Structure formats: C-alpha cells, structure tokens
Amino acid sequence: MEKKQIIRMFSSILPESAILHDRISLRAYECDALSAYRQMPMVVLLPSQRSQIQDILRLCYQHDIAVVCRGAGTGLSGGALPLENGVLLSLAKFNRIHKIDADNRSAVVEPGVTNIAVSQAARAFGLYYAPDPSYQIACTIGGNIAENAGGIHCLKYGLTYHNILQIKIITIQGELLNIGSGCLEHQGYDFMSLFTGSEGLLGVIAEAKLRLLPLPAHAQVVMAAFADASQAAQAVADIIGAGIIPAGLEMMDKLAIEAAETYVHAGYPRDAQAILLCELDGTKEEVHHDIDTVNGLVKKAGAFTSIISQTEQQRQQLWQGRKAAFPAVGRLSPDYYCMDGTIPRKNLPKVLQRIGEMSRQYGLRVANVFHAGDGNLHPLILYDANLPGQLSQAEAFGAAIVQLCIQAGGTITGEHGVGVEKINQMCRQFDAGSLNQFLRVKKAWDEKNLLNPGKAIPTLKRCAEFGAMHVHHGELPFPELERF
C-alpha cells in the first residue's frame, strides 16, 4: 500500500496533527538510544485514546502493515528501530497516572508515564516504585515492561516483572486483554512472564498496575575505592557471601570513575582502578549493623579508601556519579556502544581481565559500569563513527563481549533486550529447538508477523547464514516459521 493511501486510511482514526509523515518530523523517530542504527519510518502515529490504538492495530492487521511501538526511545538495543515500510506507533501521549492506592500499595498508570514520575507521585503516601533504570527520568513504564528493565535496586527488589501486578495488552487484532490481577498470585498460565521482556513482539502495553513499596526508614551507602578491579570483585563476593543483600551494589572502573568525577564531582578518588557503591536500607539498627559489616569486608578485600554517607545529600551525591555514568562517558568520545551481558558473580574478575585484553586487541577504549551484585555488565566501548571502520570495529568488539558472557556461563542481555543489536548472538546462546519454540509463541500471538518484525528472535536460516549453527531444511521442526 502506498504512503498516501496509508495516511488517508489513518486519517479516519486520528486528527491530522497526530499523523507525522514529512521528512523533518520523521527524523526525530529514526532511532532509539542505539543511535548507530537509523532508519526513517514511513509514518508516525500519535494516538491519545486507547480505542484509537485498537482501531490502528485492526487496520494494520487487515492491511498487513508492520507496526513498531515506541515509548520514550531510550532503549539501547534498537528495539524501537522503525521500519521504512511500516508505521511507528508512539505512546508518548499516554502519560497519566490514574490511581495511587496506598492501602493496597499499588499504582495504575498508562504506558507513557516515566519511571521516576511513579515514585514522585507515590512519595506523598510514603511509597515508591523500586525498579530504577539509569534513564529513569526519561524512560517509560511501557518500555520498562517491554524490556524487563532493572536498575540499581534490582538485586534486592527484583526486576520490572517482580514489581507489576497486572497489565492490559492490545493484540495486533485490536483485542484488549487483562493479564495478571491485583494480587501477588495469578491464576492460569503466567502470561505476565511471557509479555514482560517480550520487546513489543506480542502486543501493545496499554496500562499497568504496579507494585509499590514503603519508603525505607533509613539508607546509607559505602563508597569503597580499590587499587585493583579484582579486589572490588572479591569484595562483591564477600558481601553476598556474608548473607547481606544490599539495596544496590554497583561497580565502576577507572575510566568510568574519571568521566563521572569530571562530570558531576561525586567525590570519587581519581587514583582508584575501581570503586564499589554498596547501599543498605531498612531500619536504622539494621543499616548501621550491616554498614559496619560491609565496611569491614571491603577493607579486608583491599579497599584503600571507604566513605560512609552521613547525610541524605551525601548519599545522593555518591550515587549521582553512577547515575550519570553514561552521559559522562559520552564526553570522552564522539560515540560509544553500550553492551549489556550478565555473568555469574564469581566470574567477574576473569571477565573484566579479558575485556581489558580485548580492548587492546581491538584498539578501542572501554569503560566498565555495571550492576555488580547480579553480574549485569555494561561495558561502554568508545569509538568515533566519523573514522572509517571504527563502528564495525566497535560492533565486533561488542559481539566478542557478548560471546564472552555466554562462555562464562551467562546470558547476552540483562535488561536492555536483544532488539536488532544482539539478534545474531541469540543464535549462539540458543539451539534450533529453543529458537523454533520462541517463533511458535510469536506466531500464536502475531500470526502475520506484524509487530516489531525482525527483532529479538532470529530464524534458523539467519543463524545458519551467521554461521552459528549448521541447519538442513529437514531439521526444521516448523519450516513454515522461517518467514518470520
């Protein structure tokens, strides 16, 4: 169908101002935060009512038009990369918090509500929303659910999945489904798990009921500096081994420390090879006891400096450097490529050492910022896209890091998703049978493959072409899925 026809078709649903199709307007939607990959959408649609989303999806299903859903565009895996022959469905106007239920500790929100806005609204009731990705000031709840985002507090309080009670989904056929309940226990199949982290492949998130927690009575953070990254990694193992589950346990290497300190002046020692930020929360008695224990453990592991926050302002300041690490590193290089792999904690020292070796091998600097408590790595590969071959070199380096995570017993993503960035590495992590089962689930919910096609799940044919597995046609359990 031609572009003019599509515009005319959606004009029956949306006002003219909510249909963007000129080149200048479309430019703002050509990529998400993985800006190395760009593509102009054919049309951008900006509905403001749920019924409009349903009508849009029904028309797309009827006329075989592909749909990419977008929240704030802060995703780091290309999950919201548009299609030149499809529509981009923006949920930016769905930014209302419908209800804060203090008695049942829950919030009902639309998908375009920013992560931080939920905690700001809940604070008046002594509550907050635990998942807090670094981009929480901008990223939206719908995107968090689509990627199963985590953040600093996920070690103790869980990922997005553990903090949602119910979601409303609109299928590609325009049907509205209620998944989950207002309770902690759900009846029937656990479709909540299926949709959380499904990267827009199965349906459009229209509403979410979130679990809220009481604000901690007290919180303090220990900032420990080490002359060697392996000492910091050992401290992580010692803290967890002592039975302490911190509210946050983060690690940064020297390059990340220098960038963050220059950017926000958080109070990090520039001569450290690594720092550890360990936050404890709970009652004052619990926190004081555990802070003393953690302080002793980091010193035993080799910390040459440890600072314990004494005021809320100091606690926030120590976290500010970690929260601002991504933009801070962006000041060191014209471009950077953010990876997202997860490994067993015990393998942190070896993996960090190998990443350092690969940095020299590929000739590109890398700053390591990660959730040390759950082994979720975020190596930031610095490069200059203006220099011929550097983007390809950065991509190769990133693929090698992801492969390293698999070899270390981990996985290719912790919270950023697969998108287009790591779709080839899916072929490394999963065998043919597993991938075909993923495709069967996709087919059950989206039989025409119209929702975010080409993302997250590779076909076996693609894996064979990538060289990750040798596939004969007779080995395909469901050859009809290959068109997906």
Image (cartoon, rainbow, N blue to C red):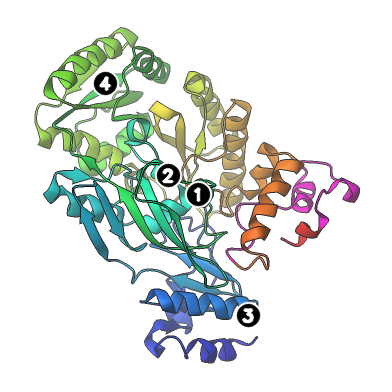
Q: Give the CA distance from mark 1 to mark 3.
A: 27 Å
From the image, tell me which residue sits under label 3: 62
The kind of residue on which mark 4 rests is Ala
Q: Name above or below for residue 240 compared with residue 9.
A: above
Q: Is residue 457 magenta?
A: yes
Q: Which mark is residue 197?
A: 1
Please tell me which residue is depicted at 15% across the width and 48% down the height of the picture: 123
Question: Helix, strand or loop at disc 4?
Answer: strand
Q: Name above or below for residue 484 compared with residue 47.
A: above
Q: Give the CA distance from mark 4 to mark 3.
A: 58 Å
From the image, tell me which residue sits under label 4: 224
Give the number of the mark in front: 4 or 2: 2
Q: Give the CA distance from mark 1 to mark 4.
A: 33 Å
Question: Helix, strand or loop at disc 1?
Answer: loop
Q: Decide which of tag 4 and tag 2 comes sooner along the chain.
A: 2
The kind of residue on which mark 1 rests is Gly
Give the number of the mark in front: 1 or 3: 3
Q: What is the magenta range?
A: 451-479
Crowding at mark 1 (Cα within 10 Å: few <14, some 14-19, many 20+): many
